Amino acid sequence: MEESTYRAAGVDIAAATRAKELMAAAVRATHGPAVLAGMGAFGGCFDAGLALAGVESPILVASTDGVGTKTLVAAAMQRYDTVGQDLVNHCVNDILVQGAQPLFFLDYIAAAQLDPAMVTAVVGGVAQACRAAGCALLGGETAEMPNVYAPGAFDLAGTIVGVVAREQMLPRTDLAPGDAILALPAGGLHTNGYSLARRLVEQHSAYDACPAELGGASIGAALLAVHRSYLEEVTRLRATVPVKALAHITGGGVLDNLPRVWAAATEQTGRRLGAVIRRGTWEVPPIFDLLLRLGNIPEQEAFHAFNMGLGMLVIVPADAVAAALAAVPEARQVGCLIEGEGVQIAD
Amino acid sequence: MEESTYRAAGVDIAAATRAKELMAAAVRATHGPAVLAGMGAFGGCFDAGLALAGVESPILVASTDGVGTKTLVAAAMQRYDTVGQDLVNHCVNDILVQGAQPLFFLDYIAAAQLDPAMVTAVVGGVAQACRAAGCALLGGETAEMPNVYAPGAFDLAGTIVGVVAREQMLPRTDLAPGDAILALPAGGLHTNGYSLARRLVEQHSAYDACPAELGGASIGAALLAVHRSYLEEVTRLRATVPVKALAHITGGGVLDNLPRVWAAATEQTGRRLGAVIRRGTWEVPPIFDLLLRLGNIPEQEAFHAFNMGLGMLVIVPADAVAAALAAVPEARQVGCLIEGEGVQIAD
């Protein structure tokens, strides 16, 4: 934002300047040797010659995503750093399923009127998650759009670019019945199902309610639980066992996201694949039990609206399960691929 | 969007499916040999080995931007393809000023509720401008966020990634007093000044008014004039004369954007630079005269809020002006660099 924009909005310029400096420092802390220009340049510059050296047949993988109406929960709770982390981690996981490691990220924050403290908190969260992922926060844009956004609401979107060596790309097409499905646990709803969750909480409870099943935490805090990045766990798994495919469980849940991993294999081999997910093989975080109880939601709908604790699914050959679980002890085997179609939730 | 989302919103599924197919075809038409995966994959895949071959010391340049409240004019006029073009061209110009050529683009469209016909028109415009720029439309995201967006309003943002050989990067730091400033003409407001322009039109006139000074066109149509891409003209200029720097005139106008080109030169050489822009050396599009008249806006404010017809400024050595104007006849010399500070508008 220009200083004149702040001034027109009646904002304390000294506070805005401090906020800008804090942001700039947080952003610079994400910059490795491949970043050429800092903030204030026209576009962010990234040395591809340096960053891609040593990657055989480098493929860039790019994805744009947002955090959806989780921003409304953040606004209700007046807590803005976690959605910044959610945004980056969501994007990191999205390109991870194609085998890519993050290179750089750009964010977009828009509202009717931007509060500098809010923007600083969001960008701080974005920068924190970028640093954790070894990803440069290369640029971003803030926009004030009165009459487009509802008062107090904001949107948050971002774009990630990563790289993978061509022969390391996922999913592989040798997926077969009998392959094991491992799950890496979700921290909560991540960034999907918030329209439903908010409706349930607003109709039947409140964000500051602390029901017994959440063990002392408020519903609002449980809903803001950060979208986990699986970069570290997946990197460790790929170094240990032949990972065949990954499914990041986002909008549409396991029912919509898991079939996407074998679409290419089916197209290439003609072999129809499906999956069975076994109930009780992983821990469902208590926020889901609460939401299902509040809305009296049937299982099939729940597995479509929410990740239900299945944050990232990892498909490995059956004989690699023991080694995989030894490498990442919090992983669980939750099912396997079968001949067939679709995803069944079964005992 | 998922089909279930369409269904929940009471949308005609057959129409939505047709819209999706049209979009997919428009997107595929932007895909050159470097694009690996089509729509529906998790992230877009782009063969860096292929695309960067032959670029010495390749630097990736990335930028995220939006079209601001021009989306409200599009909604008022029920015309959605031009803002898609605006978005891409704005981003193309933003990385062009660092010398970069476009590689790929990702878009983000969000609203309280998305109309498939609107999304198809926007993405069609995005794809059209991408194709014209030789840029792959690699991915995108649509989001429905009730309670975040005002009814009928939408936001449109995008991210571009381009490449430049390190030694071709702009701005150069040998900028000097006496260098000529050429202007490439703007098609209208491009994507800046719409909050002011909308206020003026809504208070003093109407989008469907056709005042004499617009020669038959409506104010709404003049306000939707497409943000021009200068890729072709700049490429031609760089092939002909030693272009030292470019300034894309966006938010803050010539007064804020032109000084950004010599910031690096000043930091490196300690030499203070400024610029004089000479009135009457270029054609100011009539929409600006109209807006200035409606709001009785002083010149200084006008040059801060609007591009005033100066779409892209190109800085070349004084002895290269004749060759530059021969290469791009619609360019005009509008001023020169001086010793000093800031930008003066003078006779």
Image (cartoon, coloured by chain):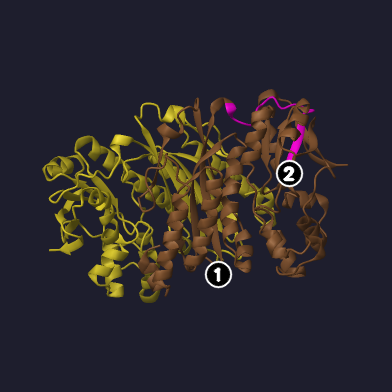
Chain colours: A brown, B yellow
Q: Residue at x 50, y 66 (%)?
A: A117
Q: Which disc, if any, is residue A135?
A: none
Q: Which residue is mark 2?
A: A254
- x and y, in percent, of residue B148 in the image: 58, 64
Q: CA distance from mark 2 to mark 1?
A: 33 Å
Image quadrant assignment for residue B300: bottom left
Residue that carries the numbered disc 1 in the rendered image: A152
Q: Chain of mark 1?
A: A
**Residue B301 visible in the displayed image:** yes
| Front residue of this view, candidates B286 and A34 | A34
On the rendered structure, is B96 left or right of A259?
Answer: left
Residue at x 46%, y 47% (from the top left corner)? B159
Which residue is at the front of the view, B127 or B276?
A: B276
Given contact means CB atoms under 8 Å apart, are the residues at marks 2 and 1 in contact? Answer: no
| Amino acid, disc 2 | Val
The outermost residue toward the right is A347
Residue nearer the viewer, B308 or A275: A275
* Residue beneath the point at 19% across and 57% down: B274
What span is in magenta? A168-183
Q: Main secondary structure of the magenta part?
A: loop
